Image (cartoon, grey):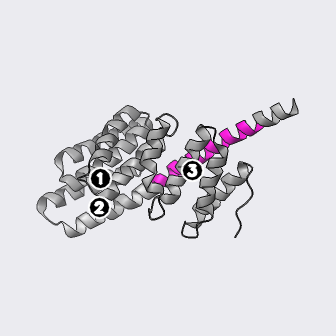
């Protein structure tokens, strides 16, 4: 009987860890996406000074500024609609940035099917900037870890977890959460260990991976 209760306790602990990690990962993705979008918008604003791009840039940045003050689900949906308008009237670069923001806000407001309808074409479009395609993959994964087909998640995140990928730490954490969903605790710990032991990974992400490992009953990484 003791073994049964221990097993139940371990399962509940793993579930709590997964919930915490998922919240952390989504928040971190939001920060990463904001940086990517800000850099992309700045580059577009600097290098493309044609009148159409200038108008599109002004419209995009205005909506982006309002997105920073989002609150309720209805407010997110309203701002998402504003990004949709920007996407409909902007050149390709700004349109893609606007659609990425629109999808993120829709997902956060509980409209995941509508967000998926935006993410899917972006993930499948080989003609857009590869970084923006990767942002679409990470945005999709952050909201689909609990529901999407595991093999599809693995196929999409696998390339982003490669050694030379800038998304590697976050992609590995998402894959670890997927492993926990599937009951593969040892594999989840291995993925987290890769993050925690990688000196090139930002310190806060290494610390979080280490804390999650310990919460799952794994020893603290050395070094």
Point out the tag, 2 or 3, that comes first from the N-terminus.
Answer: 3
Point out the tag, 3 or 1, that comes first from the N-terminus.
Answer: 3
Classed neighbour count for the residue bearing mark 2: other residues with Cα under 10 Å, few (<14), some (14–19), many (≥20): some
Q: CA distance from mark 1 to mark 2?
A: 8 Å
User: Which residue is at the front of the view, 76 or 94?
Assistant: 94
Question: In the rendered structure, which segment of residues is drawn in magenta?
Answer: 9-31
Residue located beneath label 3 in the image: 24
State the image coordinates of residue 81 (x, y, percent, origin top left).
Answer: 29, 39
Q: Where 183 sits versus 67, above or below? A: above
User: Which residue is at the front of the view, 17 or 74?
Assistant: 17
Q: Residue at x 37, y 60 (%)?
A: 36
Point out the tag, 1 or 2, that comes first from the N-terminus.
Answer: 2
State the image coordinates of residue 77 (x, y, percent, origin top left).
Answer: 36, 37
Q: Where 221 sits versus 22, above or below? A: below
Q: Residue at x 67, y 47 (%)?
A: 186
Residue located beneath label 1 in the image: 97
Q: Which residue ends up furthest to the left in the rendered image? A: 51
Quarter placement of the C terminus: bottom right
Does the segment drawn in magenta span residue 17? yes
Q: Secondary structure at mark 3?
A: helix
Q: Secondary structure at mark 1?
A: helix
């Amino acid at each position: 009987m003791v073994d049964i209760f221990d097993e139940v306790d371990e399962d509940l602990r793993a579930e709590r860890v997964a919930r915490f990690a998922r919240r952390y990962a989504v928040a971190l993705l939001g920060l990463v996406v904001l940086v990517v979008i800000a850099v992309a918008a700045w580059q577009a604003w600097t290098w493309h000074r044609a009148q159409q791009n200038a108008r599109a840039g002004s419209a995009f940045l205005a909506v982006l500024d309002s997105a920073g003050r989002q609150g309720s689900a209805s407010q997110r949906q309203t701002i998402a609609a504003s990004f949709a308008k920007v996407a409909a009237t902007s050149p390709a670069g700004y349109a893609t940035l606007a659609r990425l923001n629109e999808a993120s806000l829709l997902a956060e407001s509980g409209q995941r099917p509508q967000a998926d309808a935006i993410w899917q074409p972006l993930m499948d479009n080989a003609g857009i900037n590869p970084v923006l395609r990767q942002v679409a993959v990470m945005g999709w994964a952050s909201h689909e870890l609990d529901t999407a087909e595991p093999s599809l998640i693995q196929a999409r995140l696998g390339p982003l977890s490669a050694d030379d990928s800038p998304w590697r730490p976050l992609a590995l954490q998402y894959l670890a959460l997927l492993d926990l969903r599937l009951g593969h605790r040892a594999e989840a710990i291995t993925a987290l260990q890769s993050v925690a032991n990688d000196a090139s990974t930002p310190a806060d992400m290494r610390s979080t991976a280490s804390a999650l490992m310990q919460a799952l009953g794994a020893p603290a990484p050395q070094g």
